[in-house]
Amino acid sequence: MTPSHEASQTGRADFDFIIGRWNIHHRRLRESLKGSTTWEEFEGTAVDHKIAGGWGSISEVNMYRASGTVEAFSTRLFDPESGEWSIHYIGGTAQGTVGSYVLPMIGGFDQGRGAFYAHDTFDGKHILCRWLWSHITATSCHWEQAFSVDGGNTWETNWVMDLDRQKE
């Protein structure tokens, strides 16, 4: 393997752990960036598979909230030049509206922990959004989302997912 080919492969398999079918326990803060400590808890499922010859993956998620079932979809694409992943998310609501990150979450994995960031707006405020993947095993993993209004000095975690692989 040539050095340039080896460099282009580094990180390409980082999301291989997520390929498959999952049961998900969600905890979502009822009100973000308002000092709330009240969480909504609900279940969900996901199916993840590789695309583009392994250079990316797709996640199809169903969330079973009290307000109704919500479908979400994300694509993860690996850039061999930068060695980073970009994640695009589109999520519906039970009321039929669609939310998405216009800019992708960008980042990668280091020592088994994935960190991804994007600039966004929330309730008219410019924020930094962070997604973390951790506690990754063959049968489970943990994901969380946090917002920062001060450029990343402090973070409010507002959504947590614990995923367990479905039995085949």
Image: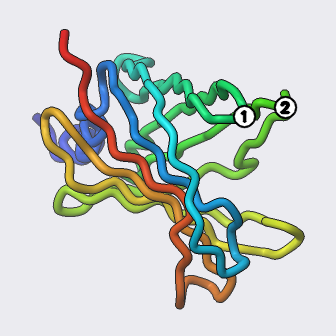
Res. 9 image quadrant: top left
Residue 49: image x %, image y %? 38, 18
Q: x, y percentage for residue 78?
A: 42, 39
Q: Are marks 1 and 2 in contact (CB under 8 Å)?
A: yes
**Along the viewing direction, whichever of 22 and 42 lies nearer the viewer:** 42
**SS at circle 1:** loop
Q: Nearer the viewer, residue 76 or 22?
A: 22
Give me the residue at 40% from left, 40% from top. Answer: 25
Q: Quadrant of the C terminus?
A: top left
Left or right of residue 64: residue 12: left
- Which quadrant of the figure has residue 127? bottom right
Q: Distance between the residues labelled 1 and 2?
A: 8 Å
Residue 42 location in percent, x, y? Answer: 51, 39
Rendered-image quadrant of the N terminus: top left
| Label 2: element kind | loop
Asked if residue 32 is positioned above or below residue 151 in the image, the reply reads above
Three-letter residue code for mark 2: Gln
Q: Name the residue under label 1.
A: 67
Q: How crowded is mark 1: few (under 14 residues within 10 Å), some or many (20 or more)?
A: few
Residue with the mark numbered 2:
95
Q: How dense is the environment of label 2, judged by Cα within 10 Å: few (below 14), some, or many (20 and up)? A: few
Q: Which residue is drawn at 64% across and 74% down?
A: 36
Mark 1, mark 2: which one is toward the viewer?
Answer: 1
| Residue 79 higher or lower than 33, as above or below | above
Q: From this viewpoint, which residue is outermost toward the right?
A: 124
Identify the residue shown where x is 27% and y is 42%: 14
87 on left or right of 66: left
**Residue pictured at 70% horizontal, 76% vertical:** 33
Precedes in sequence: disc 1 or disc 2: 1
